[in-house]
Amino acid sequence: SFFTAGTGNAGPTIVSATFLLLATPVITFMNGIRQDKEPWTEMREVDFGNGIGNKPVWLLDNPDVPTTAMYLNPNEKPPNCSSRFGTDPLPWNYLFGAMKALPRSLLYNRDAMQNFALFSEPIIRLVDKLVGATNAMRCDVTASNGDKVTLRIAHSDLEQCVGLATAAFALEMVKKDKQTVPPGVWFPSELGNEARKNILEVSKEDAFVYEL
């Protein structure tokens, strides 16, 4: 589950990208079978930790879902997996839900959606000043034996969070003393335990919530 206050200081770009995702079927996995679902449905309340609290999130397509389900344990049946997103202020979420009524051909029109987002930029920037730029993520994992693990991480600024995460992967790839990522192209779910641990260690820099 993901939460971003306003646009996270990313401005119209994240808004137009969300419009495109509202026209995209959401890939989920349930009982080992891929199930494509309607975007911005099946709302849940998710606790993102101190300073953020409970936030509503809705199904939204995320490439990490199929890559995690299919490549985390490629020789086993895909686990249940889905992804949700929500934002502040609350009316923004209802606006996204209402945008689904538009024809998909229009939502898929990148130029039209970007122009609409740019037209709305003064309002978007005002809202960003009011609600901040917090970005948070929560991952809930339940093992086949019933054991549960939850990771929560939050930063005060989306742009900083994205920069840290990108740098964390890059640093792990260029290490010479102890290489943890073999040559090739890999999905994050295919990385080994040590690489994952190191990436999380860098990514949590300046996080005001980090719980595992």
Image (cartoon, grey):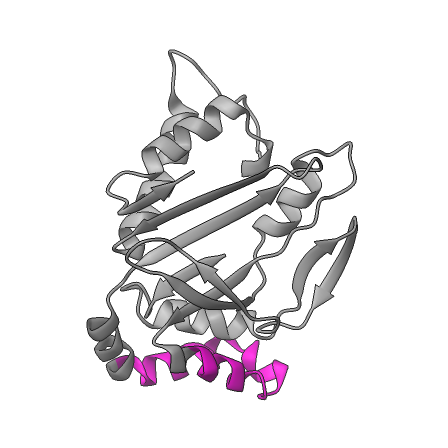
For the C terminus, the image quarter is top left
Q: Quadrant of residue 182?
A: top right
Q: Compare residues 93 and 44 and report the one nearer the observer.
A: 44
| Residue 10, quarter of the rendered image | bottom left
Q: Residue furthest front?
A: 146
The location of residue 46, given as percent across then percent down, is 47, 61
Q: Position of residue 104 (x, y in %)?
A: 62, 81
Residue at position x 66%, y 73% in the image: 38
Q: Nearer the viewer, residue 27 or 59?
A: 59
**108 is within the stretch colored magenta:** yes
Residue 115: x and y, percent? 39, 81
- Residue 185: percent from left, percent from top: 57, 33
**Residue sitting farthest toward the top:** 177
103 magenta-colored: yes
Residue 121 lies left or right of residue 138; in this view the side is: left
The residue lying at 32 percent from left, 39 percent from top is: 204
Q: Which residues are magenta?
A: 93-121
Residue at 32% across, 84% down:
120
Left or right placement of residue 146 versus residue 58 in this view: right
Q: Is residue 126 above or below residue 174?
A: below
The quarter of the picture where residue 48 lies is bottom left
Chief SS of the magenta region:
helix
